[in-house]
Amino acid sequence: MLNDNQENRLSSRLIDKKLENDFKECERRVSILKRISLIFAFVAIIFSFLILLGWIFNIPFFRGDILGFYASKFNTALTFLLAGVSIYLLHVFKAKSILKSVSSVLSVLVLLIGILTLLEYILGINLGMDQLFYSQSFLAGNELFIGRPKISSALILIFIGLSLSLLNFTKDNKIVQPTAIISGFLAFYGFIINIYGIQLNHIGDFYFQMGIYTSLIGILLSSSILFYQADEGIMQTIISPYIGGKLSRILIFGSIAAVFGVGLITRLGEDFQIFSQPVGTGIMVVTSSIILFMLIFWTAQKINKLDKYQQKALKTINELEKFYERIIESLNEGIFVTNKDDEVIYFNAALKHINGLGDFELKNVNYKFPHLEDNFLEYYSKAKNSLQPTYFETLPLNTGGETFYFTGWILPEVKDGKFNGSILTIVDDTSRKFASDKVETSLKEKETLLREIHHRVKNNLQIISSLLNLQSSYARDDRDKELFYNTQNRVKSMALIHSKLYQSDTISTVNFKEYATTLAEDLLSSYQTANNITLKISIDDVFFNLETAIPCGLIITELMTNSLKYAFKDKKSGTITINLSGDDEKNLTLVIGDNGIGLPESVNFDTTDTLGLELVNMLVKQIEGMVEIDRHHGTSFIIKFKQLHYPQRT
């Protein structure tokens, strides 16, 4: 069993499917009518050409003067031929083609012939239209104007010419299709009087009589023009998939066919003397009334059925709207909708709570983003101009003096490439914002504490350095003093690290270039040698953590101290170089060297018992590196390593 919501969704899908099928059927009807328009134009051309042949070669059947029907005029047939060619060219010409110009000329010519023919009747003069194309010398002797089309035929030519001219020059279906309908009914009138049989007993009969072929071609050409643009104007209403189109298609053709059929039967009854003319007229009126009553009754039933279907569809839509509205109203996320004029036209209960609106009634107030700060409007303008979803985060919202924070999305609605409103979501972000601020404050406090720790460690190390300096004054020999002095330099290098960390923007890493430069310059100035020693430092901009910076600083201290003490004996000058570089794979190379007398070959770096080199060896292993010694042109220690990364400590 389906519940109400499932049935509603099913009904909605069926409605959508039916509408889709109806519109596809409408498109198919338009395509068929356009093909019929082309076919009718082609048939009219052939029909008119056969009439011309009938006059030229004296073939009564081709002229139409058979079985008591009146013949179509040569001039009328030739003008219809021009009109048919004009419509046919409208179908086949391409943009800026010479065929369009030809079609335009022919349409104007048809209109001009019709107007001149009508003027001949109105003014009572002969403008030369009677014998313009053909003399028609074998016409019946009772013809008033030999070769001249009748008034009804002239009117048909005028309306057809006017319709074609409008199609060629303006394509304004507001006038084209009504004029085509008028010409079609005039031609249908001619067809009726031929079928019913007209007796030329009155003077007016000679003016309004029409050839049977003239009426048929007039109907073909009028229909061709009417169907030429079947998806516009009056035809758009008739072929539409809606109820108006469905009813008009049945009522129009049904009523015309019914009245014509009743009239024909009545006329035949009178001709065969089955009943008199008054009785026949009465039968025609009553029968036509019955048929029209049945059509009206059928139409009423159809409308009632469609109304019930529409009510069911509206009920389904209404229930779906309520279903989705309940979902939206139950959300904790605030939602509101704006129109293209940036006015809020809907908001849910959550937004009332977030925005502090309570039972605020939208319709009573000019409501444009109340309480929202200007920075929110910047996001809204960005979404409106870019037509792309825009996210905003942690913006303030003031309600009654109290500030809240919110975040959300702005989703523009786009119609025809232009902004047509938006759907906006708002989530109360106040708790997270306060928690985030609290964490940030805590982090700042911890950072301040860590800076103080680094500062105190630096001070303590400087105190130790000072104690070592004092203690060295009590040393009895130079070797003991040197041990104190070397240890003091090691302590200074570690103190310098903590000093840099205390002064830097971040307490987790140190700018190694600044640190190594300061350290090397301090060491050089502390050793007051008679030699002229130059420092050459080339270090990439790199930031080391504490675990990597301290061992590297101690390595520089030991090796540079070693160079200052031993590398430049018997030399007046020298150079100490410190280079640090890295590659794309984050491999680092630290080179500390001098151009002094060089390290003796007898010294084995891996097995040395010298405290300084032994300490360097231990520190290289601590940073998981490798060391090479280059004894050419002095001594260079090449240390390859990667920065150590320890787990995050909390």
Image: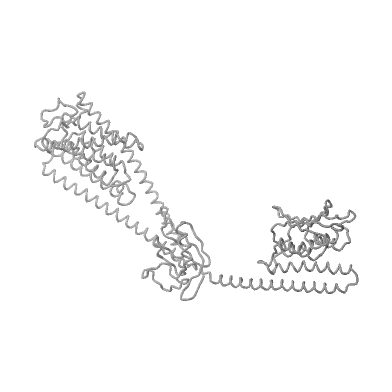
In front: 26, or 116? Answer: 116
In front: 452, or 59? Answer: 452
* Residue 503, percent from left and from top: 68, 68
The answer to which image quadrant residue 613 occupies is bottom right
Say whether residue 157 is visible.
Answer: yes
Relative placement, left or right, of 600 versus 434 is: right
Q: Quadrant of the C terminus?
A: bottom right
Position of residue 365 relative to residue 231, above or below, is: below
Image color mode: one colour
Say whether residue 627 is visible.
Answer: no
Relative placement, left or right, of 400 versus 626 is: left
* Residue 289, percent from left and from top: 19, 49
Position of residue 614 relative to residue 77, above or below, is: below
In front: 563, or 31? Answer: 563
Most distant residue in the top direction: 57
* Residue 207, percent from left and from top: 13, 36
* Residue 175, percent from left and from top: 25, 45
The answer to which image quadrant residue 629 occupies is bottom right
